[in-house]
Amino acid sequence: MNRDLAKTLPERASSWAMALTEQKSVTGTQDEAVFGPWLAAQLRENPAFSHADIWTIEVGPGDGRHCVAMLLRGTGCSTVLLTGHYDTVATRDYGELEELATRPEALTRALRDSLADADTPAARLALADLESGQFLAGRGLLDMKAGLAAGLAVCADFAESANVAGNLLFIAVPDEENNSAGARKAAPALPGICEQHGLDLVAAVNLDAIADDGDGSKGRIIALGTVGKLLPTAYVVGVPTHSGFPLNGINAAALAGSIAARVEWATELTDHCGSSPGTPPSLLGIRDGKTGYDVTTPATAFATFNVLSYRRTPDEVLDRFDRLCAEAASNLLGELKGRSQAPEGIANLVRRIPLYRFEALVEHLGPQEKHRLDAYSASIAGDLPLPEKCWLITEEAWDLSRLAGPAIVTGFGSIPYLPTNLSNAPAAMRLKAIAMQIARGSAERYGSTIACADYFAGISDMSFFGEAAESSLDIVARNTPAWKNSVRWPMRQALANVPTINIGPWGRDYHTPLERLHMGYAFGVLPQAIRDLCATLLQPSGS
């Protein structure tokens, strides 16, 4: 396949977007494993990249998935990283149209026909978009292969320019839709890459997509930071009893429910975004530990919560979460005593419910028990979701501790996505100034407005490339039960810590069958803006 026939930036961006989308790469499938080597081969075959250094980086021994790296040299050491993920969510939700899910033009026609009798606001908007000729449908086209395509178009333009200043490093990664294993591999590899090739990495540009159900003004943005995401967990141990004698025990499910009610939308865990209200925490899952029906009250329960942050570190989040859990337990005991016909009964059973962090629970174990816990953790390091592994390991640790319930064990249950913000370091301040300059001149230069926003709205690989509080990983690692055997991520030198922004395509409804891309912006405006941003960044300071 020769993609060099398309010479202009828009043509190149469109051509690469089609090629990348047509090559399936659903996360967790063989298609994702094949995609990295396939992309590397396409880059090597492209005449525009005949002088580029192109290589792959395996995510892990025997993993099968690869990051794809390409270095394009100009003059000097200054380098800008262009990065994004190539994996997509599954295509099953397309139903009868699944075979067309990665064929944008055919899918667009078929979706347009299928929406002819649209009867929901979302479907009617999708029909109007597709009939306008401004939008193109396709799984992964918006999220985020059109962003990668814009980056590749800029790379080709850079490669064919004479005496260009600086260097471009392009890295496409897998697994963003799952646990960001690709970014977690690529980010700490950057110092070694820079040392090997004599590069000074001045900035990184993530190319992820923005969704906007309006006129596109909220999608045409340069995000100067990204929101962080944590998954605090509460493993609840009760005192099981026959349901005919409920006063003789503490129902773990009721206690977990009390915690869920207290944490839901809790202002204490809502981190505000400047003058804008933050996103409140919310329950993501709650289950008791019973495997079948009987009339005994649940002995254990497990709850997970989504907590987003803009500035708060994980230790701040966990401190606040612990306080809310303890408050919920105390309130529940008070409520139960008030409802009981024999309040002295429950008062004799329990006066307070202790709370342990996972790391404190582990400290209750002797050497043999710790060895057994580690062996158990290794034995389940397979395909189970991370939150479930963390539940099972916490349960095993509790059993090995021989502590008595009731109790609450808190921790984390997933990969941490730390918030990133541009710092006051000179490189970060320069990146911010140039991004704002691009935005201010966008209407005149590109015929389309671009705005700067403080934060990228969703979680993204910016958390691993950008300036984040790496010291925060220590408390997360100590309190994420599956960290050692399933996360396999170092607590130090794990992040790139490079000034990072996001500028990508916009569209609507990604992760749904109505996923569609605004073509004019993705193929016309976006590559120009990225090219100008990189060129300005790579000019020697003061020139």
Image: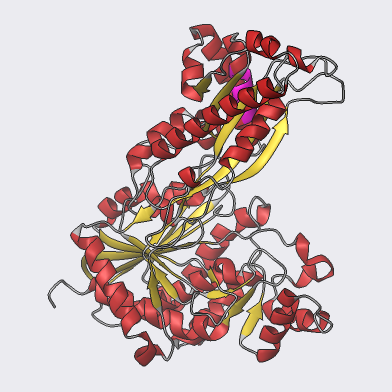
Is 257 placed left or right of 371 in the picture?
right
The image quadrant that residue 159 belongs to is: bottom left
Indicate how the structure is coloured in the image: secondary structure
User: Compared with residue 225, is residue 329 higher up or lower down, i.e. above or below?
Assistant: above
Please give the range of residues in magenta.
Answer: 391-397
Q: Eyeballing the image, is 378 above or below 123? A: above
Total numbered badges shown on the rendered structure: 0
Whether residue 142 is visible = yes
**Residue 402: x %, y % from top left:** 60, 8
Residue at (50, 17) in percent of width and height: 362
Q: Is residue 88 magenta?
A: no
The percent coordinates of residue 516 (x first, y second) are 64, 75
Which SS does the magenta portion mostly show?
Answer: helix
Q: In the image shown, does 52 or 272 lie closer to the viewer?
A: 272
Residue at x 70%, y 79% (from the top left corner) = 126
Q: For the point 82% across and 65% down, which residue is it?
A: 95
Q: Residue 347 occupies which quadrant of the picture?
A: top right
User: x and y percent of residue 80 in the render?
Assistant: 31, 66
497 is higher (above) or lower (below) than 250:
below
Figure quadrant of the N terminus: bottom right
Quarter in which the C terminus is drawn: bottom left
Residue 394 shown in magenta: yes
461 or 25: nearer the viewer: 461
Q: 226 or 39: which is nearer to us? A: 226
